[in-house]
Image (cartoon, rainbow, N blue to C red):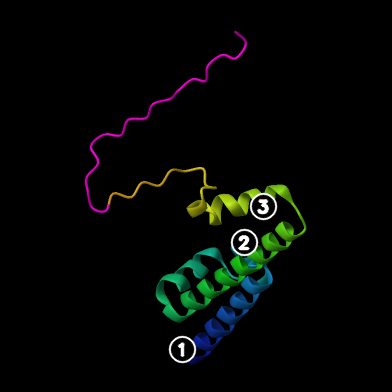
Amino acid sequence: MAKAEQNRTKVAKEKMLSALEKSLGIVTNALKIAEVGRTMYYEWLKTDEEFAKKVKEMDNLALDFAESSLYKQVKDGNPSSTQFLLKNKGRERGYGDKLDITTQGEKINKIEIEIVKPKDTDQ
């Protein structure tokens, strides 16, 4: 009986992995496709290292797919996609929204920022 249960679990895990691939990693959709309960899925993630590794690989496939779509949109001249890509991958060239401060191990006690109001040009 334990052997049959192990086989059913193995088959269910394979169905779940296949469903995750089809749904591009969207768990809720994959659970419906594979007919697996959410609690069971998360239990497998916690207890089965190999299963968790394969799920992580699925996440990377979905991310690769999304990046490919983004690059296609940039190539097609989509301005918002271009802006998104520059803000996220072009930070080192000054395109990001955030200011990164590297201290090389020094403790920063205080940062002062002076905001200079532009002179009124109407006068």
Residue 27 rendering spot, x and y as whole percentages: 59, 64
Amino acid tagged 2: Thr
Quadrant where the C terminus sits is: top right
In the picture of the structure, the residue carrying the numbered disc 2 is: 28
- Residue that sits furthest to the top in the current view: 123
Tell me if I can see residue 34 in this picture: no
Instruction: Identify the residue at horizontal 68%, vertical 52% (top origin).
Output: 81
Identify residue for label 1. Answer: 2
Image location (x, y in percent) of residue 113 = 37, 30
Within-10-Å neighbours for mark 3: few <14, some 14–19, many 20+: some
Up-down relation of residue 122 to residue 82 (above or below): above
Q: CA distance from mark 1 to mark 3?
A: 55 Å
Residue at disc 3, secondary structure: helix
Q: Is residue 5 magenta?
A: no
Q: How many marks?
A: 3
* One can see residue 81 in this view: yes
The front one of 121 and 1 is 121
Please identify the dominant SS of the magenta region: loop
Which residue is disc 3 drawn over? 82
